[in-house]
Amino acid sequence: MIKKIVLLLIAISSFISCTSTEKFTSKKKHIDQHNSYNSLDWEGTYIGLEPCDNDKYIMKRISLFEDLTYELYFEYFCTDKPLIEKYTGKLRWIENGSVLELISQESSHFNVYKYKVGENILMPLDSDGNSIEYKDEKIEYPKKSQSNKIFRKKWSLLELYGNSVGIDTNSNQKQPNIRFDTAGFINGNAGCNDYSGSFKFNDNQLINIENIVITKKYCPDMYIEDRFIKILSEKFQYEIEQDTLIFRSSDNHYNILAKFLSK
């Protein structure tokens, strides 16, 4: 009888211990889930200034992508001619998801850049993980300027001025499309001819496309192509809803000019 009671007490004690441990573990996991990596909209392009010689500056542009890769541009304004350096590589989250490392493996050297991630801002850290502070008030930590969801995708035209765009599969024409490059260039096919150009982001999600160059091939039906190129020649606003890119007129009516699907 006494042996049964002892065994029963041990079983109860084990159950209480396991339940307590499960609650603590569950609570700890819940706390750890709230970090910069999974709580902030960190994906995007960040622009800031760093000190350079002769009281001039280096503009740093950091593009972070959801596939855990990055593009890093340094534009040096402290040289006789502006110098641009580009680095690409993998990014890694450390410090329980609050700090990211940009790992660059170039042919000549190896670099690691560390940043503490805040709401729409990257705060640089030294190799020991300490914050880097600048006395110059003009220095700006990289701040988020736009999302990167428009980049690294081929956007195929679905609608133009509210009408569906269908292409005759028996013809030589293609579905009009556009690609945006992080360096500020576009390229694609307008349906018949290939084109390229440059673009700038302005305030309020405005895009301004410039310097459009297009081939001169003739196709039987140029109606869609002509209207598509006309849209690209104007300023317009953009928004992205899941896999759909939308161009809207930049006037007060915000009419939909075109819709695209990513591929």
Image (cartoon, helix red, strand yellow):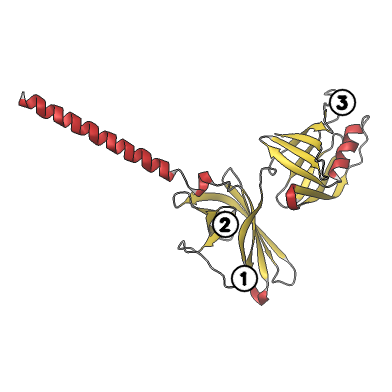
* Cα–Cα gap, marks 1 and 2: 17 Å
- Residue sitting at x 26%, y 34%: 18
What amino acid does circle 3 point to? Answer: Ser
- Point 47% across, 45% down: residue: 34
Query: Which residue is the site of mark 1?
Result: 137
Which amino acid type is marked by label 2? Leu
Q: Quadrant of residue 5?
A: top left
Give the CA separation, mark 1 to mark 3: 60 Å
Q: Given contact means CB atoms under 8 Å apart, are the residues at marks 1 and 2 in contact?
A: no
**Which one is nearer the viewer's eye here, 24 or 150?**
24
Q: Nearer the viewer, mark 1 or mark 3?
A: 1
> Crowding near pointer 3: few (<14 within 10 Å), some, many (20+)?
few
Expressed as whole percent of the image width and height from the top left, the position of residue 137 reads: 62, 70
Location of the C terminus by quadrant is: top right
Q: Nearer the viewer, mark 1 or mark 2?
A: 1
Q: Is residue 42 left or right of residue 163?
A: left
